[in-house]
Image (cartoon, grey):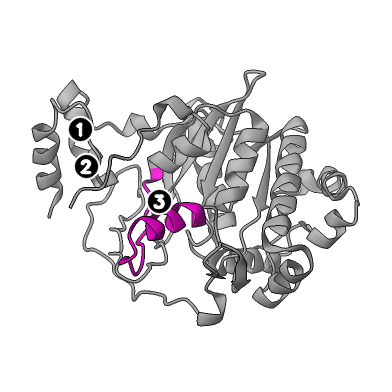
Amino acid sequence: MSNDDLVRLGEAVRDLPLVTAGSGLAIGLPANWGFEPSAAAAQLPPAGGHAVVVSGSVSTATNGQVLEFLRTGRPAYSVDPLRIAAGEDVAGQALAFADAHLGDGPVLVYSTEAPDTVRAVQGRLGAAEAGELVERTLARVAQGLVERGVRRLVVAGGETSGAVVQALGITRLRIGPQIAPGVPWCAATLPGGDTLHITLKSGNFGGPDFFTGSLALLEGRRRDHRQDHGHHTGHHRGRRAPRDRPGRHQPVRPGIRARQCRKHQRAGRRQPPDHTHRRRPRLPRPDRLALVDASGEQVAGDRASKTLALHRRIYEADPTARFVVHTHSTHLVGLTLAGVWHQDDVLRPSPRTT
């Protein structure tokens, strides 16, 4: 199947009142209402303010991203769930740390730990309780950071992203340029009218240098904007060619095709894609797999995500089901995290037919 097939499918479903499909079908829908592709669609307002990374994911990829950030020597503060459970004001301590280092460049506030450490904490507090403690704390930290002038925010972790977006009162996101497959920069208007640049990623998205790379991409666009508007120090006024940055890939789960990776802009022009990059599927370690019993209680492995409830309903409805393949549309995830849904908008499942 090619993009041309998706365009034809988009034309075919124009008059249908409801369409459910993979996110690729969206390629063929805008033309039905006269919308044409435009590079301006991914342009966001110029970025400013302090930059912070907030990470609550315990995935393998995010562990690597945290280690890469720490390797650069930039300021970082580790959030300990046991200290939160003991009643310490960990959020306040993290904000005090940020106050002292925001002027030094990007600051990382993280709860990401090695698998053995995570299991030890979950064993003492319970998997669900440990996760909720961290999510609430990181949401408070993000809220305090924005109050202190942070306007560029990278959030790692699905549940963490949801908690942060709700704490900040964000109800709408404008989707901008892609950082890595499935992860774009977005812009939100804060209650006071300021623009917050924010990116929300699930744990296993992005390469090892995602944290620093995402901020570098935004910084490059900010410099380009300043040059286009006359803010320059040299004698030649013109647009600086964006930095070449290597293409990144989303770690691929078994059975999921790697997405195409396009070269980044060079000298202000987009180069045509030369080929589709594919990666070998990265198989999860058996000891990392979340294991739960029939009642949904965690038995072993990494903490199960909140989609566990949905998966259990599927297994209960169909005793013959052996597994569930669960994929996400980037734009639908963004809408969900923004909290735009209302219970009345959810369609009730129709009776199962045979």
| Residue contact at pointers 1 and 3, CB within 8 angstroms | no
> Which residue is denoted by mark 3 in the rendering?
182
Residue under label 2 = 25
Name above or below for residue 127 compared with residue 4. below
Give left or right: position of 296 versus 251.
Answer: right
| Residue situated in front as seen by the camera: 56 or 121 | 121
Q: Which residues are magenta?
A: 307-330
Rendered residue at 81%/46% (across/down): 98
Q: Quadrant of residue 219?
A: top right
Q: Residue at x 67, y 73 (%)?
A: 114
54 inside magenta stretch: no
Residue 297: image location, x then y, percent:
61, 64
Q: Amino acid at mark 1?
A: Leu
| Mark 2, other Cα within 10 Å: few <14 / some 14–19 / many ≥20 | some
* Mark 3: amino acid: Gly
x%, y% of residue 279? Answer: 33, 72
Disc 3 + disc 2, Cβ < 8 Å: no
Q: Residue at x 52, y 39 (%)?
A: 337
